[in-house]
Image: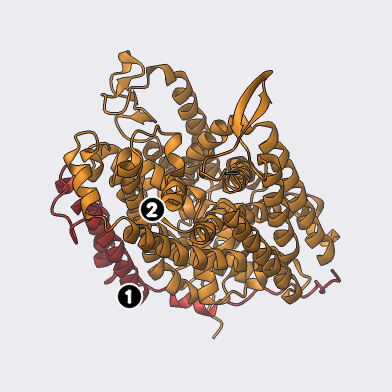
Amino acid sequence: MKKTIPLTLLVFVVYALHQDFWNWKQAEPLLSGFMPIGLAYHAGYSGVAALVMVVFVKFAWPAHLENVEPYRADNKTEAKR
Amino acid sequence: MIPALVVFAYLAVILYIGIFAFRKGKATSEDYFVASRSLGPYVFLLSLFGTNMTAFAILGSSGLAYQRGIGVYGLMASASGLVIPLSIFFIGTRLWALGKRFGHMTQVQFFRDRWECSFIGTVLFALTAVMLVPYIIIGMMGGGHTLETLTTVNDAASNSVMIEVLRNGQTILEPKHWISYELGSAIVAVVVMSYVFFGGMRGTAWVNAFQTVMFLTFGTLAFVLIAKNLGGFDHIVERLAANPKTEGLLTRARISQQEFFSYTFIPLSAIMFPHIAIMCMTAEKVTAFKKTVIFYPLCIAAIWLPSVFLGLVAADQFPGLKPGESDDVILRLLTANTGVVVAGFLGAAIMACVMATDSQILALGTMFTKDIVSYYAGAERFSEATVVWTGRAFVVTITVVAYFIALALEDKAGIFELAIRFAFSGFAALAPVMLAALFWKRSTKWGALAAALWVAGTMAGSWYLYEMSAGLAPKPGQSFVQIFPVLGDLFLRSPGNVLVYGFLPVMPMVLGSAFFMGIVSLLTKAPSRATLEKYFPANADSPTARQTK
């Protein structure tokens, strides 16, 4: 529960940041002289999304799934092709 | 002709990969349908990403950016970069564990067992199958058209050689091609069918992984070469900014804030596509998901960022193209700015995306075999060999039927493209059903049925409103039009969509699905204790938790 609240907040904040209304009708500044700010912002957003997933893998990884007991269809035999 | 030769070399390579996978495989249904759940982390990442890439990501995104500007990236790519990895993280890992623990290979097998009901599985099977078929047909059509375009015959001055053809009783002039649409579609159908038929999931996954690597490599190369040939992009952006007709492309002036927000719901569809869900069951270990969810947003950026930006470049290079004409701006840029071999390699990469139908065909074959034939006829009646051959028979049948539909309804491609658009919303709206099945003990089959009916009804309703309001559609830049003035802004018509209070239908569809799933579940009887203990064992936080050590 300690991790649930900050992680949920993180998702909501990053999700909300997708709606960058402040860049809506402006092209400048141009990143590297050619990339409009609205496009540069969302390119950076993709990087932030990757970082969010790093955080989830580190702090919310479902480790218990690593030990799932596999299903075995023992009554089935391998057949000829 | 060189681009066509490169494409044929590419087709030969993927055919070889499929046959190589056949030789490596075992003759069990688990091997044929889910590669014995044995894919390593890198093949898993690349194949899952490649499976989700469609022709639209390449051709469509550039064409759309040509018309609507940079906002297309935020509209589709950056939202997907957050939502898809999160859904793979929460849903994909659980599907993997369910498959491993209980032997499930499809979503429907899980739904039937989880809610102790055959009928709900059949309803969801029918709904997802109907939404998947248009993709296969469009893929077949796209393959035919791409091969036809790549083999256009040019004269010494690089102009298309024209020939007279009879169309609807009239003689018209058309460019001459070495390979016709019909033959191109047939070649694509035979190649895809062959490696899916022989290689099953292993062949499909390997081919998708190969395709992803190829596209990332040659897509980047093409972007760099185009930039070099044009002397950089600075002056192009300056020209676009100075022209009142194109300055809006550098901002989001052509996209409303409501539409932009509603698009964040669309990526929920990814995990609900049967081919993606089934692909999640192919990883050898759940840890394979770690790299996948972290690199997924970066892979999306690597593909979409150049594609969207090249759409802007095309607006400067080839001004005045109409929506239908701007779909091939990438090909036009390549032809004008790179050598033929590079153009050929990228043509092959585009073919790869067009041929994403492979995993969809296999998924449909898996569903028919497991959810219908084995389920209703009794799985115990069939040997493993029979099940595998049944799957293969469905792969052939689906491909042949899709091919003939692609031929017969070539001029009706718009209908299938429209069906795909609505299917995206439909799959997204089924996400609450999956979330409830995995994480909410109290969810019931009746809740799932109510949500499924809501999805089917709203999809049909959206399509009806779209068709009946076609005559009202405003031109780009004009204000939205009220479809029923008496209802105010409830239903609006934009140039390309029906809107609900300015939002895309997908938003109310998802929220409504969650509402019906919740309220109807609370009003009906929960599944039996045995089932709940099976999926939600005591002292565990997941439906699949069963510690063995």
Q: Amino acid at mark 2?
A: Ser
How far across and down, in percent of the image, does residue B471 sit? 42, 17
Name the tint of chain A in the rendering.
Answer: red
How far across and down, in percent of the image, does residue B97 sit? 55, 69
- Which numbered dot is residue B417? none
Q: Amino acid at mark 1?
A: Phe
Corner quadrant of residue B305: bottom left
Residue toward you, B519 or B358: B358
How far across and down, in percent of the image, does residue B55 sit? 51, 49
Residue toward you, B54 or B500: B54
Outermost bottom residue: B549
> Which residue is depicted at the point 53% across and 80% down?
A67
* Whether residue B181 is visible: yes
SS class, disc 2: helix
Judge whether B490 appears above or below B547 on screen: above
Residue toward you, B467 or A75: B467
Residue toward you, B428 or B307: B307
Left or right, B244 with respect to B107, comes to left
> Which residue is depicted at the point 75% across and 45% down?
B400
> Which residue is depicted at the point 70% across and 56% down?
B191
Circle 2 residues within 10 Å: few <14, some 14–19, many ≥20 = many
Name the tint of chain B in the rendering.
Answer: orange
Judge whether B24 appears above or below B91 on screen: below
Residue at the spot of label 2: B307
Q: Chain of mark 2?
A: B
Q: CA distance from mark 2 to mark 1?
A: 34 Å
Circle 1 residues within 10 Å: few <14, some 14–19, many ≥20 = few
Outermost top residue: B486
Q: Are marks 2 and 1 on the same chain?
A: no
Residue at the spot of label 1: A59
Judge whether A54 appears above or below B328 on screen: below
Left or right, A10 with respect to B39, comes to left
